[in-house]
Image (cartoon, rainbow, N blue to C red):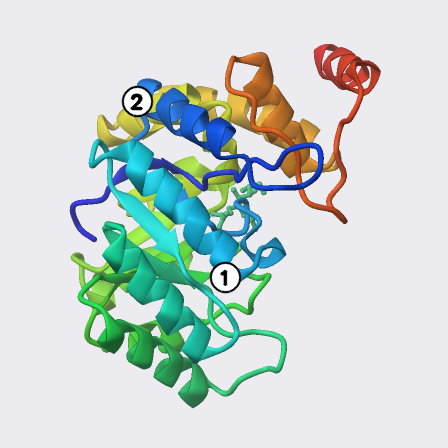
Amino acid sequence: LSKITGVLPALVTPFDENENFDEGRMRAIVDFLIGRGVDGLYVTGSTGEAFMMSPEERKRVLEVVTDEVKGRVPVIAHIGAISTHLSIDLARHAEKVGADALSSVPPFYWGFSQDQVVSYYTDITASTGLPMCAYNVPLAGLFGFDMIKRLAEIPGVEGIKYTAPTHHDIMRVKAEIGSDFVIYSGADEMAMSGLAFGADGIIGSFYNTIPEIYLALYAAVKAGDMAEAKALQEVGNAVIFFTLPRNPIAAIKRSMAWQGADAGYCRKPFGNFYSAAEEESLKAEFRA
Ligand code: NAY
């Protein structure tokens, strides 16, 4: 994982008007984002609507992405599911189609014990030769520092995607678990803070639509120019906090379309902007 740093969009998955996966749009988006300089892609995560899709559909999305990327940037495949059996199937497929790394939320819904979560990651990482990035996110249940430490001891678990609402543990992970344990900061509205606290990269939904702001922010933090990083974070946050209450994944997809990469629609029950009038009012509200 240590070779995968920088700014990685949590790639959207385009669906057409009938909610079918749209391969053509997917290929165009991949080229659009690589052309804009992103450092890698995080595929079929929450922004990618993984849990809206069947395992076969998730596999197809990843196949199309790796085929289109052709090794130009690293691909992290999110293979998280509730059952280890299914995640292993997705992980083996990801390895077969050329993903560079795996990531997974912990199994959720039934409130699994910490031992069960540890066995989940142990079994998956034992099933392929790919490095694993565990995913610490409130939606699936936050780990806490001691659990991150346990996960880091599992062979193959080389890092964490860190989307907790506080960042002090990023520093502690680097200090106590090791500076080579890779951390991706996952809250786009706190990208500057995550990087300043020691994260190696950032993964998020808004890097699908405004990657340049975050590529510049990443460079500014690395150069120690915190005033510039803060100014860029403020621009990003204006977009983020406008978008979050307005069907964010759908809004991100439409804003990509306005820039030349039509990212289609979301699967219901996520909302969509179906008409030009709806889009116009979104644009007008944003300008206001
Ligand atoms: C993924 O797996 O798709 C992600 O990386 C999602 C990252 C997003 N977090 C959540 C909880 O959805 O990009 C963030 C998020 O949209 C952003 O920080 C705004 O809150």
- At a point 29% along the width and 66% down the height, the residue shown is 92
Callout 2: SS: loop
Q: Which mark is residue 37?
A: 2
Between 127 and 3, the one nearer to me in the picture: 127
Tell me if 258 is positioned left or right of 89 in this view. right
Give the residue type at disc 1.
Pro
Instruction: Answer above or below: position of 105 versus 47.
Output: below
Q: Is residue 178 left or right of residue 82?
A: left
Q: Which of marks 1 and 2 precedes in the sequence? A: 2
Viewer can see residue 227: no
Is residue 115 depicted above or below 98 in this figure? below
| Depth check, front residue: 140 or 257 | 257
Query: Closer to the camera, 213 or 98?
Result: 98
Q: Which mark is residue 55?
A: 1
Q: Is residue 17 left or right of residue 111?
A: right
Q: Nearer the viewer, mark 2 or mark 1?
A: 1
Give the image location of residue 109, x and y in percent: 63, 75
Does residue 74 lie above or below 57 as drawn?
above
Q: Quadrant of residue 79?
A: bottom left
Q: Amino acid at mark 2?
A: Gly
